[in-house]
Amino acid sequence: MRILLVEDDTSLQSGISFKLNKECHDVICADTVNNAVKLLENSNFDLAILDISLPDGNGLDICHHIRRNFPSIYVLFLTAKDTETDIVMGYDIGADDYLTKPFSVSVLVGKVNALERRLSGKEISITGELTLDMAKQTAIVRGDSVALTRNELRLLNVFLLNTEQILTKEQLLQALWDIDGDFVDENTLAVNIRRLREKVEIDPSHPILIETVRGVGYKLNV
């Protein structure tokens, strides 16, 4: 996968690009908004990993440019800003995903690899008992094929890209209400979570895979 990495911290930039290159991704780096825009105009990218705070602006400016001119590029923000308002603002201007500093580079690599499998339509093994087939929109649960609704598929995608991370209700609502403009409220989210659990959990009344984090959201345990 061809990746634009925009990060002005040289040590972090080097560490991320080294790890992603080892995973056979093609990483091109920039450290300013101006350099990133020039690269976008002259190369094709599948994914943009953007720091928000940059010397000549911020990653939000780059995201705006991408959404106007290259809507198919997947956008992931790296930032020290981790308040709920900052996260929602990032999604509102077109981000697909968000990772707050400090973070594990291995977690980032896992996200990128999961995204590549998702975009290629391959089967994705989430745990030893659960596999997601993107092309057929089904889950293989302990050897049995289970059909997923559109919202269940979206939820499972988001959980897959954020394994072992707590996802707020706002993040999950954004995932369900983005492509077709369908309105989804918190009650509808809870219903979709319950139905997904009924399809993937051994005991839906005592979920192990999709954990509720009281007062915050949910987490997919691997």
Image (spheres, rainbow, N blue to C red):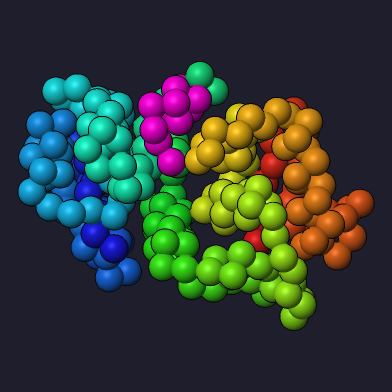
Please state if 101 lies on the left or on the right of 30 as rendered. right
Residue 109, image quadrant = bottom left
Against 196, residue 64 (above or below) is: above
Residue at point 43% right, 41% down? 96
Query: Where is residue 10 shown, x and y percent of the image?
Result: 18, 42
The residue nearer to you, when weighing 37 against 80, is: 37
Task: Count numbered badges in the picture.
Answer: 0
User: In the picture provided, is 106 more to the left or to the right than 221?
Assistant: left
Check residue 122 for magenta coloring: no
Q: Is residue 101 visible?
A: no
Seen in the image, is 47 located left or right of residue 166? left
Q: Inspect this view and state whether residue 67 appears.
A: yes
- Closest to the observer: 54 or 204? 204
Locate the C terminus and report the quarter of the image it occupies: bottom right
Q: Please provide percent x and percent y for residue 192.
A: 75, 44
- Residue 120 as seen in the image, left or right of residue 215: left
* Magenta-tinted stretch: 86-96
Residue name at image x 60 percent, y 40 percent: 176
Residue 89 is inside the magenta segment: yes
Q: Position of residue 101 (x, y in %)?
A: 41, 36
Q: Position of residue 173 (x, y in %)?
A: 62, 34
Say which quadrant the N terminus sits in. Answer: bottom left
